Amino acid sequence: MRKTARKILFILFIVCSFSAAFAQNQKKTPTSVSHFAMNADAFLGYDSFGFSYQIKNNVFSKVKGTENFEYKNVSLGKITKADIVNPMKIVLFYEDFNSAVLLDNQLNKITEINFSQNNVPIVVTAIGMSTQNQLWIYNSLNQQIGLFDYLKNEYKTVSTPLTETITFYQTDFNTFYWIDEKNNWYSCDLFGKTTVLGKASDFDEIQILSPKQYIFSSANQLYFKDIHKDGSETVSEIGIPEKSLNKFYYKEQILSIFTAKEITNYKIVIP
């Protein structure tokens, strides 16, 4: 009886080990749908209207077919970050001057914000569009995440001080995501609730899709990570022919790979 029990346990161990190994080595093969030459320093992605966004020689632009809109602001230096979550209110961040510019859908300036002139001292090192005329802000002076109302020129902190340095962040209207130097992955909502989402894989580039999913690159290879309800994880390789990639962007089942010379768009379904 004991021998039978040991055999059953051994078989279960082999099956579980095989399943874990299989989960880590699944491969997704996307289908190429289009590619075109791209003369840009940085590709930022697409919006729902089909415009692509890029930066070339510190000039921010959006392009679709023959339509081309541009914005440049020499006085504020280099563009540090561009947030295109809301294509009607785009955020350009100029960290060297502690400033941000909001643009409309034709890249006309809506407003320019100098955070150094705010009533509450703010030194911004992370920024993104939020809801109700607010911007997500990470204030390095107090190491807290906050919300800045750009119409009222009011700032409020929502999180407790962060204990580790942010190495990556991403925002949407309701959430501020970040990964620290120890690869700990967190989220903060509009009310300041901070959630530990897990340990992020080592990455060169990463795009968070949800609190349970992200795509990341490592050594010029792409992967998709899915965290299941039971806490288990699946890491799937995304098979692309490009041997070197500068940037990737995923939106609405289209994966865009930006190399030094072109952009290739792939169709891929992420569950």
Image: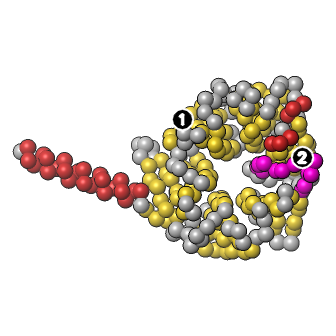
Q: Residue furthest left?
A: 1
Find numbered disc 2 in the image and state the secondary structure of the residue it sits on.
helix
Give the residue type that dot 2 points to: Leu
Q: Residue at x 66, y 60 (%)?
A: 247
Nearer the observer, 130 or 215: 215
Task: Give the residue at mark 1.
Answer: 196
Residue 97 position, x and y percent, is 86, 41
Q: Which residues are magenta?
A: 71-83
Q: Residue at x 49, y 65 (%)?
A: 28
Residue 25 position, x and y percent, is 42, 61
Residue 6 position, x and y percent, is 13, 47
Q: Residue at x 66, y 71 (%)?
A: 264
Q: Residue at x 88, y 62 (%)?
A: 69
Instruction: Answer left or right for 125 relative to 77.
Output: left
Q: Are marks 2 and 1 in contact (CB under 8 Å)?
A: no
- Inspect the magenta stretch and tell me whether residue 76 lies in it: yes
Residue 260 shows up from this direction: yes
Task: Give the residue at mark 2.
Answer: 76
**Quadrant for the N terminus in the image:** top left
